Structure formats: C-alpha cells, structure tokens
Image (tube, grey):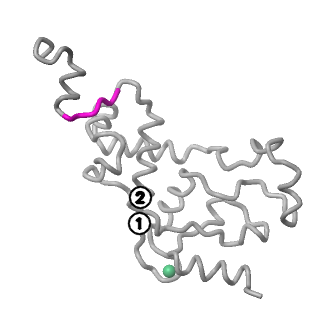
Amino acid sequence: IIVRFGGWNKAVEKAGLSLVHLRNISEKDLFENIEYVWLKIGKQPVFRDIKSPISKYPRAQYVSRFGTWRKALESFIEFINTPSDENSVEELIGKSSPNDLTSEPIIKHKTKRYPSERLKVQVLMRDGNKCKLCGITLTGDNIHFDHIIPWSKGGETVLENLQVLCSKHNLAKSNLEYPKK
Ligand SMILES: [Zn+2]
C-alpha cells in the first residue's frame, strides 16, 4: 500500500475515507456524542443508532473503549447523573455588561436560562420524548424544553422545573406568558 499510494493516509484518502484520529477521543467526547444522538432521536440510542451522520464516532469506537454497547450506556448513565455545575450562573458573573441588566426586570437566577445538553437528556430520560400536554412523540428539533414556572417569573433551569413540549404547545404556552397587546 505504501509503495502504491505513497503512504497509508494517502491510500485512505484515495479510498474516499476520511481520517479520524480515534486515539485522541476522550471518554467525555464519546459521552457528549451519546448526548447529541440522544437529543437528536429523542430517546435512548440503541446500538444501530450509533452511525453517521448523527453519530460523530463509529460504533466500533464504543466497543473498543467499553467492551459492549451496554457497558458504554451504563458508563454514560453514570456520567450524566454526575452533578454538574454547567447550568450554574456563577461563571457568568463579571461577563455581563451593565446594559443587559436594564433591558429586563431584574430577577436573580441561580441558573442559566437555557438548559445544557446534559440537562436536556436528563429531562428526556425522566419523561421520554413525548409532549407533556398532547403526548405526541418528538425527535430532534421538534423537542422543546419548557420551564414549568416560566423563566421570566423566576423559574430556574433545573430538572424539576423542565418538561418536554411539542412546538405547538410550547408556542401556546409562551403566548400565555406574554399576552399580545
Ligand atoms: Zn403537544
């Protein structure tokens, strides 16, 4: 191969395959990829869901790292249930300009407005990918994460205050929250 193509990488390129440097992938990368796939399909991915283009990494990567897909999922569940401060507002302190504070009535929040990917997956794990109001099954961009107590009324971005809604009901709810004049 090296004689014919002038190197392994060139042969891979010639075969139309892209080079993925699998050795540099961390467990966190692999878990975040599961998070991404989970949010895209709206539910716990099964082994055959781990494929391009939704998954960044091939299935084999999970098998070689964890032994089996089941073990990979078990490690993932552990990862996702590890307390994370990702949604904490503290890191924002000092970053907001004074102008941000004058545009809206000031409500002190402990969390950021938009849930992290991890929090979204936790909501899906608890509720499944069905609209809480109409029960319709949702995937990808049709999944809306709604604050039960609205953010504008001081509701926090925490698991207990989030629910899955379809776009219709999410819109209906935000119209209630901000009545048209
Ligand atoms: Zn709905």
- Residue 9, position as x, y percentages in the image: 24, 21
Q: Is residue 29 above or below residue 150?
A: above
- Residue 76, position as x, y percentages in the image: 44, 44
Q: Which of 60/160 is in front?
A: 60
Q: Residue at x 69, y 84 (%)?
A: 176
- For label 2, the residue is 40
Q: Specify start and end residues of the magenta stretch as a single range.
A: 16-21
Q: Amino acid at mark 2?
A: Lys
Q: Is residue 168 above or below residue 74?
A: below
Q: Is residue 129 left or right of residue 15?
A: right
Label of residue 56 in the image: none
| Label 2, residues with CA under 10 Å away: few <14, some 14-19, many ≥20 | some
* Residue lying farthest to the top in this orientation: 3
- For label 1, the residue is 139
- Residue 89, position as x, y percentages in the image: 75, 49
Q: Main secondary structure of the magenta part?
A: loop
Gap between marks 1 and 2 measured at Cα: 6 Å
Q: Is residue 150 above or below residue 20?
A: below
| Label 1, residues with CA under 10 Å away: few <14, some 14-19, many ≥20 | some
Q: Residue at x 21, y 19 (%)?
A: 8
